Amino acid sequence: MSRPPPLEAYFRALRRHFGPQRWWPAETPFEVMVGAVLTQNAAWTNVEKAILNLKAAGLMDPRRIHEVDAATLAWALRPAGYFNVKAGRLKNLVAWFLERAGGSVERLKETDPARLREELLGIRGIGRETADSILLYALGFPTFVVDAYTHRILSRHGLVPEETDYEEMKELFEKNLPRDARLYNEFHALLVAAGKEFCRPVPRCAPCPLRRFLPGK
């Protein structure tokens, strides 16, 4: 029998180094849902600017986003890049949210998360990372979010092959960690911090708190 990957040891090392991440930064669960769409191919600093634009225009509300014309919405989203595309994706998400739950996050929380994930993935423009971000960060379901930083760190450390896909990596975390939304939330945020600071395309391994886990160390 193969040994389980030392994920909890990775988590402890990252938490000691970075401290609590308190992610996702948002005032409401709906704002998390919006941010999950806007952060696609965008730096978070630019997403924050777009969110401020939405708030200033009185658009941080599902019904207002649904009713506003696409051009006005796209203008508010300009800082996040691909603003016309993201305006369409956000309208798709909001249309589903209003029809599915009347704009109520609490009603969404009453749904089985596996079924909800399928529905989210059926919305045009909502991929697996975005869907899982909504489930974890907005709704509090224990589903692990996988991103490019996660893939890079785990593959460089020999925990997964380079060709491992999203679902396989998600399953690795969910099978080898307790089913705990708070743990998944913090672990994903810590991996993002490590990816940004140390596990870059050109890695900075020497000061990284995960260096001792590298193969051959």
Image (tube, rainbow, N blue to C red):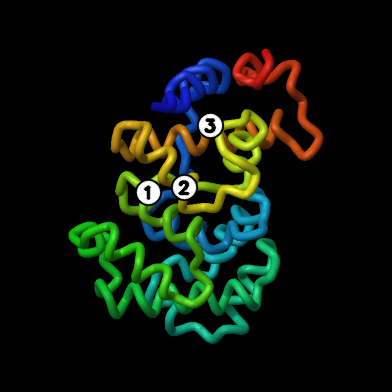
The residue that disc 3 covers is 190
| Disc 3, SS | helix
Q: Are marks 3 and 2 in contact (CB under 8 Å)?
A: no
The residue that disc 1 covers is 136
Left or right: 199, with 93 as reference point: right
Mark 2 to mark 1: distance in Å?
Answer: 8 Å
The residue that disc 2 covers is 145
Mark 1 to mark 3: distance in Å?
Answer: 15 Å
Q: Earlier in the sequence, mark 1 or mark 3?
A: 1
Mark 3 to mark 2: distance in Å?
Answer: 12 Å
Q: Residues within 10 Å of mark 1 (few under 14, many from 20)?
A: many
Between marks 2 and 1 in the image, the one whose residue lies nearer the viewer: 2
Task: Give x and y (percent) for residue 133.
Answer: 44, 53
Task: Give x and y (percent) for residue 130.
Answer: 49, 59
* Above or below, comparing residue 87 to residue 206 in the picture: below
Q: Are marks 2 and 1 in contact (CB under 8 Å)?
A: yes
Between marks 3 and 2 in the image, the one whose residue lies nearer the viewer: 2
| Disc 2, SS | loop
| Disc 1, SS | helix
Q: How many marks?
A: 3
